Amino acid sequence: MTSPDSTQNKMEKITALCKRRGFVFAGSEIYGGFVGSFDYGPYGVELANNIKATWWEAMVQHERNIVGLDSAIVTHPKVWEASGHVGGFSDPMVECKECNTRSRADHLLEELNVFADEKMTIEEINTIFDANRDKLTCPKCGEKNFGVVRQFNLLAQTNLGNFSEDWSKEPAYLRGETCQGIYINFKNVLDTTRVKVPFGIAQIGKAFRNEIAPRQYIFRKREFEQMEMQMFVAPQEEMPVYDIWKAKRMQYYIDLGFKAENLRFHEHENLVFYAKAAFDIEYNFPFGFKELEGVHARGNYDLTQHQTFSGVSMEYSDPYTNEKYIPHVVETSVGLDRTFLAVMTEFYDEDTIGEESRIVLRLPKKLAPIKVAVFPLLRNRPELVQKAEEVFALVSKEMRAEFDDNGNVGKRYRRQDEIGTPHCVTIDFDTLGENPELLDTVTVRNRDTGTQERIAIAELVNYLK
Ligand code: GAP
């Protein structure tokens, strides 16, 4: 088991690396920060884009019957009434009477190993909370003086397109999950493409939730990104298709290079009334196993709700059997930011090469922000710099590369190890023909082993690929 010290230590190391190397910055940092908001820096955006690309590859490119979508963030407000978010998308909030800090009641109880969740009624949660009051302390001031638990709606409002004085009476909403944009386009996709049920729609995009207590770095943010896929199936196919996707989504992480022991399924104890099954894929974050992804069998609730609220039929007519039904939905839903944190946790490592200790991100090549770094041995020798620029121009046409002539080569290696660059290429005097046998060859250094090989420039791109 990880001790609290080692937990904090690993988390601190990861956040320090993310800041130092330009992966993640605190949101609005020069203004003192903005709770629950983070910005991805130059290497962070590359890693995030690569994560999204692997997800898209697995969910759209490799699948014959899944297509993509990019729907609007702000939709007709009725979408969120139909989905149930306006009425019931809330978390149980409790305020400390001493310091006014607001906390999630279910999270406070979880620390005592007492189960409660947002699907319970507020009366049920208050009963459980009251039974444990004497043990519950405020995470900020440590006092045991909480108020009554209340439901707090997580939907964030906006006045986009609303010019009235008091727009909060008829607000539009920033989407609380991306899948609603998929449901409202179910008919459009069906009518304009060659898909037939069963088929899926995949989408990556921002979602917003007024999280009461955003915490654990980028694990729980107020503005975050989701990667969601909704598979539309015949009613009798829902559970078989569900089992397939449950297995496929677990395999996705294994294929990325995650250790199986750091992943596990967790079955929801309390299902919403329309759901048939819900499992989380949990990852072993530095603070323990927590939800990374949800795989849900949602019945035909979502399409039925949108049919009722919009008046547009969501019925599907099977071209082979002539059977008519509202398709059921199997959903896979994962946060990009949580995947990012899981990737940093999984591939962060420390070791020693020779006498020197180092931090190394052992990222799989397809996730690495920079695939290759190109160094002239010395920055004050124009002939080395010119040749290195030629090599950089060659490799950067094929992959994300970085040119670095700053500091000694050892320091440059350390910098690249910390951002997970699989290969570093050095142009030295042998490249220029000082040793005629090595003319037009370069040294390629491997991130994981520290070993070096001499490779002909003509072979370099193939070798790196
Ligand atoms: N459409 C279903 C849905 O949104 P969810 O369990 O509320 O289900 C799905 O969210 C995933 O989105 C979670 O497993 C998590 O990875 C991510 N997620 C949810 N809330 C988040 C937050 N506040 N910050 C970062 N990621 C979040």
Image: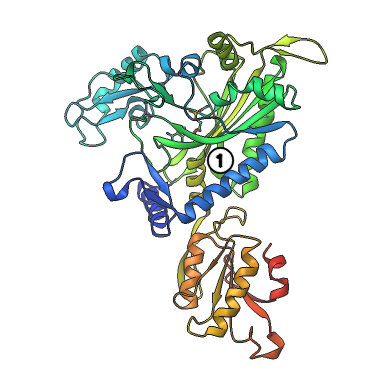
- The image shows residue 133 at horizontal and vertical percentages of 26, 23
Give the image quarter of residue 371: bottom right
Marks counted in the figure total 1
Along the line of sight, which residue is nearer the eye, 463 or 404?
404
- Horizontal placement of 367 versus 356: left or right? right
Along the line of sight, which residue is nearer the eye, 204 or 58?
204
Does 304 appear above or below 194?
above
Mark 1 element type: strand
* Quarter of the N terminus within the rendering: top left
In the rendered image, is residue 224 in sight? yes
Q: Which residue corresponds to mark 1? A: 263
Give the image quarter of residue 275: top right
Along the line of sight, which residue is nearer the eye, 203 or 62?
203
* Label 1 crowd (10 A; few <14 / some 14-19 / many >=20): many
Task: Inspect the image, locate mark 1, and give the three-letter code of the amino acid beneath it.
Answer: Leu
Which residue occupies 48% across, 15% down?
Answer: 78
Which residue occupies 49% across, 37% down?
Answer: 225
Along the line of sight, which residue is nearer the eye, 289 or 52?
52
Q: How is the image coloured?
A: rainbow
- Horizontal placement of 324 versus 175: left or right? right
Which residue occupies 62% across, 48% down?
Answer: 256
- The image shows residue 153 at horizontal and vertical percentages of 37, 21
Q: Residue furthest left?
A: 98
- The image shows residue 250 at horizontal and vertical percentages of 62, 38
* Quarter of the C terminus within the rendering: bottom right
In the rendered image, is residue 116 in sight? no
